[in-house]
Amino acid sequence: MKNTALTEKHISLGAKMVPFAGYNMPVQYEGINAEHAVVRNGVGVFDVSHMGEFMLKGENALDLIQRVTSNDASKLYDGKVQYSCLPNEEGGIIDDLLVYRIDEKTYMLVVNASNIEKDWNWIQKYNDKDVEMHNISDRTSLLAIQGPRAADALQSLTDVDLGSMEYYNFVKGTFAGVGNVVISATGYTGAGGFEIYFENEHADKIWDAIFEAGAAFNIKPIGLGARDTLRLDMGFCLYGNDIDDTTSPIEAGLGWITKFTKKFTNSEALLEQKEQGVKKKLIGFEMIDRGIPRHDYEITDSEGRNIGKVTSGTQSPSLQKAIGMGYIEKGMDKEGTEIFINIRNNKIRAKVVKFPFFK
């Protein structure tokens, strides 16, 4: 199992460590509910250094990205980030990812930890025009500083005006006395904040500086458990749960990152799917009766007919109610439709709601 550059820090802070995507990662410190509230209302720090980073360089870097990703990367400008996915040849999704345009010939792709090797091999398969590719995952640390107080807590550490940074933009600058740090106004919590990328050797220094600067704002370390409940509040997809090699971006409600102004892997079939409609669709639901939905629980209609399955579910600390996501038959996906979740052989009432759950 791999460690991040900060694993010893997490252990010394009393984190509960668990294996995740081949890494030894902190799942919680003082508790998921408390950590969730810290990020929603203040500011917290996630070590997400397990994520993968690829650098693509050269005249044909954009061409390669355009052919393997669903979104239109030609719309990017220097300092802009884009959410996208890598479609496979059968209609499913290899991975979802972020595309960073550093300059006209240099891009950084940020991929999920569990898919680093798979994604690298997939992109390399289409690299027939000598694009220079570098997998910098093992030498790159990534911290997500999330919450409404994030800009205030971090501002003393950089000359970059954090308060004026627009969502899904980034800059390269000096942070905590370390040069060449990527500061990105992105995140996976819906609470606002930043993600910062830097070389592993600076991890301890940057971590300590963040907690010193953020002390006045009651900054706290946050584990992957609260990361999951925060993203679920927003209806953000988690690869391996809500999207995978068998689910299409159209079924997953990711039509907004699937642009048919260009050709990309399996684009003809996905366009046909968009035009003709899908048989199943990813929806959000909240429980009416008591019960917590979990991954793979069966979804039925009032007559007990199987109409789908749960992909993610939790008791939301923000909403004080149980919520979930899942794929169900088209026609049962209208807002307000009553559905039933099979929890330990009991049909528990729920209703379809619009994303995000937390507004």
Image (tube, rainbow, N blue to C red):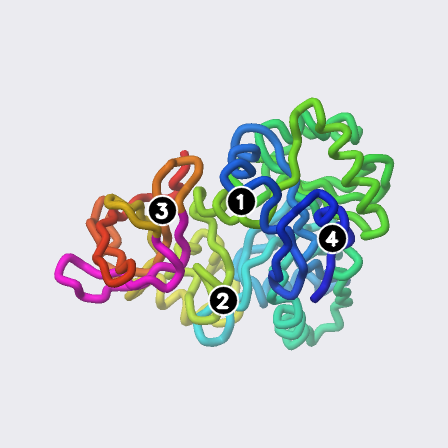
Q: Are marks 4 and 3 in contact (CB under 8 Å)?
A: no
Q: Are marks 4 and 1 in contact (CB under 8 Å)?
A: no
Q: Are marks 1 and 2 in contact (CB under 8 Å)?
A: no
- Vertical placement of 313 versus 358: above or below? below
Quarter of the rendering containing residue 138: bottom right
Nearest-to-viewer mark from 4 and 2: 4
> Which mark is on residue 226?
1
Seen from the viewer's position, the closer of residues 94 and 37 is 37
Q: Earlier in the sequence, mark 1 or mark 2?
A: 2
> Which mark is on residue 323?
3
Seen from the viewer's position, the closer of residues 217 and 134 is 217
Local crowd size for mark 4, using a 10 Å CA cut-off: few (<14), some (14–19), many (≥20): some
Amino acid at circle 2: Ile
Amino acid at circle 1: Ala
What SS does tag 1 mark? Answer: helix
Q: Residue at x 86, y 41 (%)?
A: 179
Quarter of the rendering containing residue 173: top right
Seen from the viewer's position, the closer of residues 11 and 62 is 11
Q: Which residue is mark 4?
A: 7
